[in-house]
Amino acid sequence: MRILIVEDEAGVAGFVEQGLTEAGYAVDIARNGPDGLEYALAFEYDAVVLDIMLPKMNGLDVLREMRNQRVKTPVLLLTARDGVDDRVRGLDVGGDDYLVKPFAFPELLARIRALLRRPPLQSGNILSMDDLEMDISQREVRRAGKHIELSPREFSLLELLLRHPNQVLTRTQIVEHVWNFDFYSDTNVVDVYIGYLRRKIDRNFDPPLIHTVRGVGYRLSEEKDD
Ligand code: CA
């Protein structure tokens, strides 16, 4: 596994490099934003550790450009303790996780392992499965090239399913992510909205993507039920 570290502080870069190398990773280091972007575009890294405060081009711009160029590599952002806005923006522009400085090396290692376990990120603002496509920023959904009109709630529900492909989501998980507290007690609402979604994205298309996992919840998958 090859990891890119984009960090201008020599001390931090050095200790991360040493630790990751000892843990068996191949490590490259870039010391400023433009170099980091160039490396990230030039090589297929398995993960990128990206500092936000960088000379010449900050980490958020590097990340945004990576995602624009459809680089799907998981990115762990390094942020300042008081950088709440940076963290939010970082996740919004396509960061996968963040770590607040100063951090302990074992935590960095654990987070990198977690990132590497994830299926490859779908690029930029597009989530897709089979011929179903969702453009997050344009809030547009298409299946087989056909535009599908969804209500905001249906959109959030489908987005949640697309972000967890082939994973069973319980009614409780769904209700907690898509509805507010008022609905916590009533998971029937999930079944109702799944019904709406099915009519729009599955009824006139093949294969069906929304699968019921009896007694548990739902799963978005191209595979047929067992
Ligand atoms: Ca820095």
Image: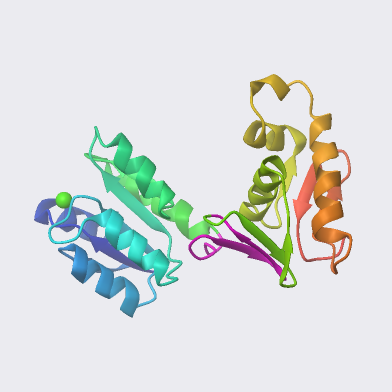
For this view, does 110 lie left or right of residue 52? right
Q: Quadrant of residue 184?
A: top right
The residue shown at (24%, 51%) is 52
The residue shown at (73%, 54%) is 149
Q: Quadrant of residue 56?
A: bottom left
Q: Position of residue 9 (x, y in %)?
A: 12, 53
Is 131 included in the stretch rendered in magenta? yes
Residue 193 visible in the picture: yes
Is 78 included in the stretch rendered in magenta? no
Q: Quadrant of residue 188?
A: top right
How many numbered tags mark residues here? 0
Q: Quadrant where the C terminus lies?
A: bottom right
Q: Quadrant where the N terminus lies?
A: bottom left
Residue range in magenta is: 119-136
Name of the residue lying farthest toward the bottom: 42
For this view, does 18 lie left or right of residue 88? left
Q: Position of residue 176 (x, y in %)?
A: 65, 31
